[in-house]
Image (tube, helix red, strand yellow):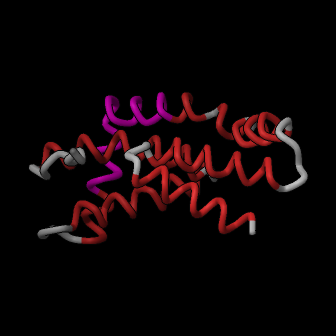
Amino acid sequence: MIGIAIFVVFAVLMLAGVPIGVALMLAGSLGIGMADLGWLSIPNNFYAGIAKYPLLALPMFVLVGSIFDRSGVAQRLVNFALAIVGRGPGMLPMVAIGVAMFLGGISGSGPANAAAVGGVMLAAMARAGYPPPTRPA
């Protein structure tokens, strides 16, 4: 019953043009309110979701990614991965995966790895002529 109510509220909100994140939040809050957990469990769950210690390290990994890019270490990693994968159409995204694999082994944190590699590889892909990401209208 609760699952059906969550789905119906989510579908109605989406049809009404509410953004996806807000529709998920409102439908989930309704589900929590209907399930004997009480409305006061919503702030506790929200805090528990964002109070992760690895998330505190994300700004430092973004800084490390910027330092990698400016010092030339990122270009060396890209050249190393290109030497392994080879050159050709569509190889730079595969290089991004290879660089993420190397840095993931070093850092051990997925979000931090995405922040560091994303900053480096987006600049490399822009220099290589890949089109920028398109924003939905």
Instruction: Report whether 121 appears left or right of 58.
Output: left
Of 129 and 49, nearer the camera is 49
Residue 94 appears left or right of 65: left
Does the magenta stretch mainly form a helix, a strand or a loop? helix
Determine the residue positioned at 61% across, 44% down.
Answer: 26
What residue is drawn where x is 21% and y is 67%? 91
In the image, which residues are magenta?
62-79
| Residue 137 vs residue 75, the one in the foreground | 137
Q: Is residue 74 magenta?
A: yes
Q: Nearer the viewer, residue 107 or 115?
A: 115
Is 94 displayed left or right of 89 in the figure? right
Q: Residue at x 9, y 49 (%)?
A: 129
- Give above or below for 35 relative to 88: above
Q: Quadrant where the N terminus lies?
A: bottom right
- Image quadrant for the C terminus? top left
Closest to the observer: 110 or 15? 15
